[in-house]
Image (spheres, grey):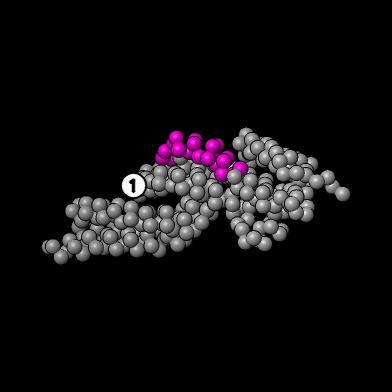
Amino acid sequence: MAKMIELEEGWQFLAAGMAKMRLAVEADGEEARIPANDYLELYATVYNMCTQKAPHDYSRQLYERFKEDVDSYNKSTVLPPLKEVQGEILLRDLVERWRKHKKIGNLQGFFRYLGRYYIPGNYLPTIQQVAYTSFRELVFNEIRTSVTGAVISMVNDDREGKLVDRELLKNVLDIYVQIGLDTYQADFERTFCESTRNYYSTKAQTWILEYSHPDYMLKVEDCLKKEMERAEHYLHSSTGPKIMEVVRSELMAKNAESHTNV
């Protein structure tokens, strides 16, 4: 019979293992690994602590402490550096941080035994969901206004013909979706559509004065073509039709106004 592991002893061992794992990911992210023997020991510890009879079944305590540990790590280590940067640097750092976050999640599989009985039996979010929620609420929500602003600024630079990293934009917007499509639609898509409306409203007022009607219509056609290309490259599929409608309606509305006033 395996030796019974008490809560504090077991948690200290697990917390040390998690800290070691995070340090490995922070050091060389993509190549971080937990030695097989260490992983088995961590898994065996969780198994031991979740399969004893009450009052030595520590499933609830492990679940709660895991959440507290993830929250603490996100608040103390992940968030502060991201709050110190802006613009494209923020976007690049966010993409790298999200990659590491997923890597850490993949290495925390030794907690999955909780998912066998305790989590479904108590209708609780999975370990992965706990980690994703923590990142969304304690990291992403704290910087999302700056992130959205940086994305919109880069998209407008793209519209102006400036060289931008479209792959970076795609990776950032993928984070919105991976955290939750509702987050993407509520926090980004709505703001982006309004920003696009303002951008093309301003452009149309200038173009109406600069171009003849035939040339203006060619300009509209070119804008729609390029906007579709951008949408297909880095926006979620739900956004493309909405953006095209915004661009089309704004440019054509100004065209109609100009002819009404003639």
Element assignment for label 1: loop
70 falls in the magenta region: yes
Q: Which residue is mark 1?
A: 160
73 falls in the magenta region: yes
Q: Is residue 223 visible?
A: no
Between 147 and 77, the one nearer to me in the picture? 77
Side (left or right) of 191 relative to 172: left
Q: Which region is colored magenta? A: 69-89
Side (left or right) of 44 relative to 138: right
Image quarter of the C terminus: bottom left
Q: Position of residue 252 (x, y in %)?
A: 26, 63
Q: Position of residue 41 (x, y in %)?
A: 78, 43
Q: Amino acid at mark 1?
A: Glu
- Please give the name of the residue rendered at 84% of the width and 47% of the height, measured from the top-left corner: 2
Res. 88 image quadrant: top left
Res. 223 image quadrant: bottom left
Between 219 and 26, the one nearer to me in the picture? 26
- Please give the name of the residue rendered at 27% of the width and 60% of the height, measured from the top-left corner: 251
Q: How many marks?
A: 1
Q: Position of residue 257 (x, y in %)?
A: 19, 62
Classified by dominant secondary structure, the portion drawn in magenta counts as helix
- Please give the name of the residue rendered at 31% of the width and 56% of the height, measured from the top-left corner: 197
Side (left or right) of 206 relative to 51: left
Specify the farthest residue to the left. Answer: 262
Side (left or right) of 219 relative to 144: left
Between 244 and 49, the one nearer to me in the picture? 49
Specify the farthest residue to the right. Answer: 1
